[in-house]
């Protein structure tokens, strides 16, 4: 069969498609090519099958003169099932003389299948087969050739971007729904500022400890880097202890001038010092019956620590300028990003206060050590930021998701939140957020850790460009993982060594 297909026309159409398309745009693109491919290749029918995750079959999602899902082909006993299983194209020019599922499909659709060409649609971000694209002819047409096969395989490579974007969006929605259900089923209420994300084992342990502290009103020390969510955990401890309606008083010890620290915590009477024109309660009094949260406790000046120690030990104190003893009734929750034990050794923190501050210590790991939480956190932040900015950004592009999960996040959860807010602010409604709108830090990381074409201008970010960029990135990662061993790298990529060498030469990658 001599193909009349114009691949340059296909490329021209595909080059106009950017990575910021919505899912509806990708659906429209697939429908468009199902309509035009039979004309371009001079065939009678074209069908795209996708594997159903819940059944052992392939379902026709898009097809010439077919309603969606009208054909459900088994994985065994069908040509499309064979292609999905082997990941290799199949040409069959004598189909009507063979047994198989195609005979049932012909009865169902009224079509007389004689010649077929089937090609796998392979994931661009992995080695799995997403589905199959099938061309069909009846009696009277010329047989399919290897040239037709090569052309269809090229088209399948382009269209895999569309299909993977659709499937990824469905997967993200499914993950988000599962996550929402899981969080709603926990035994604690959502904290006002946001949900507590605990997908990783280490954060599950933190959550379990928080729940144990519900009925144990001991003082707690929360340790972790800046931005890990120490205050969020402190509020959860406070609210889960049945103090949700009682005061939660946060104090950042690092922001208090040394001369005002004592007045801040214990209060003062009118005239106690210059400028004290009226009496004022201290933080211990304000937190009566509730929790006093001391953020950055390691920054507390030494000169106020003795009086602070007595207030904790005796649950009482007095205002500046007064001898009246005021009883306190507070739970102390402290937080620091410092090693307090080391501060005690170095003389920067009182040992007796250190042992009085807490009975239980909670360590919150940095985000880079709990990467399972990055995607759920990003999804939660996207939902909240869309609502906050009154926008409807569709989600994250596949490349952006890989970047977010690979970045080390020195600013932890707080930095991730600000990054998502930036991305939402710079992305139009119904579009996917892209790497090119990330902050300078993430773009720099992307350039250093991925092939340069991963981050390109949005106007030039076509589907072929995406495929090329992803191939380069995967080859680069495989070679890096195998220390340049091309045989091992080709196995990781599930291609032949000769195929890898050709791609390295084509893309001019460093050997």
Image: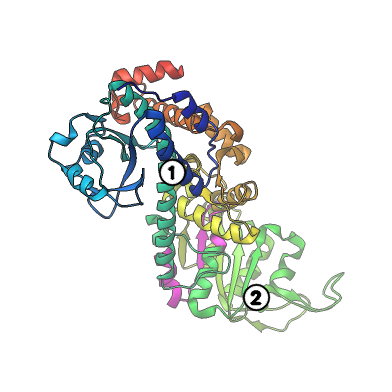
- Coordinates of residue 495 in the picture (x, y in percent): 30, 26
The image quadrant that residue 290 belongs to is bottom right
Which of the image's four quarters has the N terminus? top left
> Earlier along the polypeptide chain: callout 1 or callout 2?
1
Q: Which residue is mark 1?
A: 31
Give the mark count.
Answer: 2
- Coordinates of residue 394 in the picture (x, y in percent): 53, 51
- Could you tell me which residue is drawn at 72 percent across and 69 percent down? 264
Q: Which mark is residue 18?
A: none
Q: Secondary structure at mark 1?
A: helix
Q: Is residue 199 left or right of residue 335?
A: left
| Residue 485 in view in this figure | no
Please state the extent of the stretch shown in magenta in the rendering. 207-231
- Coordinates of residue 136 in the picture (x, y in percent): 28, 35
The image quadrant that residue 121 belongs to is top left
Which of the image's four quarters has the C terminus? top left
Toward the viewer: 449 or 159?
159
Q: Is residue 119 left or right of residue 267?
A: left
Q: Is residue 431 magenta?
A: no
- Could you tell me which residue is drawn at 59 percent across and 37 percent down? 436
- Coordinates of residue 339 in the picture (x, y in percent): 53, 52
Relative to residue 32, is residue 469 depicted above or below? above
Relative to residue 495, is residue 135 depicted above or below? below
The image quadrant that residue 100 belongs to is top left
- Could you tell me which residue is drawn at 45 percent across and 75 percent down? 214
Toward the viewer: 195 or 340?
195
- Could you tell me which residue is drawn at 48 percent across and 39 percent down? 399
Q: Which mark is residue 284?
A: 2
């Amino acid at each position: 069969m001599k193909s009349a297909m114009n691949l340059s026309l296909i490329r021209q159409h595909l080059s106009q498609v950017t990575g910021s398309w919505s899912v509806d745009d990708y659906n429209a693109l697939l429908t468009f090519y199902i309509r035009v491919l039979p004309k371009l290749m001079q065939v009678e029918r074209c069908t795209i099958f996708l594997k159903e995750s819940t059944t052992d079959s392939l379902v026709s999602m898009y097809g010439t003169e077919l309603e969606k899902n009208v054909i459900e082909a088994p994985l065994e006993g069908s040509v499309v099932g064979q292609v999905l299983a082997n990941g290799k194209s199949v040409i069959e020019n004598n189909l009507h003389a063979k047994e198989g599922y195609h005979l049932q499909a012909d009865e169902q659709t009224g079509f007389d299948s004689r010649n077929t060409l089937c090609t796998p649609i392979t994931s661009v971000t992995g080695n799995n087969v997403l589905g199959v694209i099938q061309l069909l002819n009846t009696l009277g047409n010329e047989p399919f050739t290897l040239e037709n096969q090569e052309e269809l395989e090229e088209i399948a490579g382009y269209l895999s971007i569309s299909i993977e974007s659709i499937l990824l969006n469905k997967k993200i929605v499914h993950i988000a729904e599962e996550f929402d259900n899981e969080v709603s089923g926990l035994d604690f209420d959502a904290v006002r500022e946001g949900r507590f994300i605990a997908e990783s084992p280490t954060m599950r342990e933190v959550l379990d400890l928080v729940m144990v502290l519900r009925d144990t009103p001991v003082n707690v020390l929360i340790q972790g880097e800046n931005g890990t969510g120490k205050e969020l955990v402190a509020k959860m401890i406070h609210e889960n202890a049945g103090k949700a309606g009682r005061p939660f008083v946060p104090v950042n010890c690092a922001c208090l001038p040394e001369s005002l620290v004592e007045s801040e915590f214990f209060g003062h009477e009118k005239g106690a010092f210059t400028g004290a024109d009226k009496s004022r309660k201290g933080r211990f009094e304000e937190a009566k019956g509730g929790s006093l949260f001391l953020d950055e406790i390691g920054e507390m000046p030494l000169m106020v620590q003795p009086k602070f120690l007595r207030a904790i030990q005796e649950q009482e104190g007095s205002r500046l300028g007064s001898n009246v003893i005021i009883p306190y009734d507070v739970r102390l929750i402290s937080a620091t990003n410092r090693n307090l034990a080391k501060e005690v050794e170095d003389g920067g923190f009182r040992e007796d206060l250190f042992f009085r501050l807490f009975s239980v210590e909670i360590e919150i790991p940095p985000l880079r050590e709990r990467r399972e939480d990055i995607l759920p956190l990003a999804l939660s932040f996207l939902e909240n930021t869309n609502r906050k900015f009154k926008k409807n950004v569709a989600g994250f592009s596949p490349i952006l998701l890989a970047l977010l999960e690979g970045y080390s996040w020195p600013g932890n959860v707080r930095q991730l939140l600000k990054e998502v807010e930036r991305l939402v602010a710079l992305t139009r409604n119904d579009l996917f957020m892209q790497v090119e709108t990330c902050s300078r830090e993430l773009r720099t990381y992307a350039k250093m850790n991925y092939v340069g074409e991963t981050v390109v201008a949005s106007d030039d970010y076509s589907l072929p460009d995406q495929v090329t960029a992803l191939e380069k990135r995967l080859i680069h990662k495989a070679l890096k993982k195998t220390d340049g061993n091309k045989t091992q790298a080709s196995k990781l990529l599930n291609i032949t060594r000769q195929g890898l060498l050709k791609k390295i030469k084509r893309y001019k990658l460093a050997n």
